[in-house]
Image (tube, helix red, strand yellow):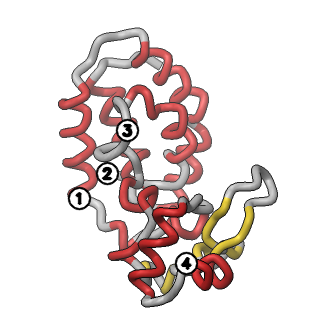
Amino acid sequence: MITDLVQIKTLGEKKLDDNLRFRRFMKSRDHSDRILRRIAEGIQDQIDCTACANCCRTSTTEVTERDIDRLARHLRSTPERVIQEYTAIDPEDGTRILKFTEGAGCVFLDGNLCRVYEGRPDICQRYPHLVRGNGSIASRMWSLGERAAVCPIVYNSLEAFKEHMRFRR
């Protein structure tokens, strides 16, 4: 099990093409999503996200109206104030995101902990989108290749999936 973030970044970037080939491999074969979820759950149980929080430091978080309402209730504020104080418009695609500072990460990140954990956006609740998420794991593979360079759970899960499915590099 690899958890060192420098190694995860290096290996994840090095294996990006391999992970894209694995995505095509998965989509062309029958497999049990239940078994892959079980593998991912086992890995997720061994890694403490609060010891890492790399996703919160490196990735922006798109928010929905529902997320804003949940954050407002959690913060005992109004949706308008949450939008004003804690969100921004992503200059790349125009979506509403939580404010993000390069190096420091998400506006709600405090050390390795989320200050609004109980009220966090849906996308944060489902991260890293292996055990929880819409559709099959194979249908979510388009994003997992890049996340393997950020998240130890994703990196180790993909490697375990490859081994389980006897993927030849």
Q: Mark 3 or mark 4: which comes first in sequence?
A: 4
Q: What residue type is disc 3 on?
A: Asn
Q: Residue furthest right?
A: 91
Q: What residue type is disc 2 on?
A: Met
Residues under labels 1 and 4: Cα distance? 36 Å
Residues under labels 2 and 4: Cα distance? 41 Å
Q: Element under label 4?
A: helix
Residue of label 1? 46
Q: Element under label 2?
A: loop
Name the residue at 43% across, 27% down: 139
Q: Is residue 157 visible?
A: yes
Q: Mark 3 or mark 2: which comes first in sequence?
A: 2
Q: Mark 1 or mark 3: which comes first in sequence?
A: 1
Q: Mark 2 or mark 4: which comes first in sequence?
A: 2
Percent position of residue 1, x then y: 31, 51
Name the residue at 40% across, 26% down: 138
Residue of label 3? 134
At label 3, counting other C-alpha atoms closer than 10 Å, the crowd grade (few under 14, some 14-19, many 20 or more) is: few
Residue of label 2? 1
Percent position of residue 34, x then y: 19, 31
Q: In which quadrant of the rendered view does residue 134 lie? A: top left
Percent position of residue 77, x then y: 49, 88
Mark 1 or 3, which is nearer the eye? 3
At label 2, counting other C-alpha atoms closer than 10 Å, the crowd grade (few under 14, some 14-19, many 20 or more) is: few
Residue of label 4? 79
Q: Is residue 50 left or right of residue 19?
A: left
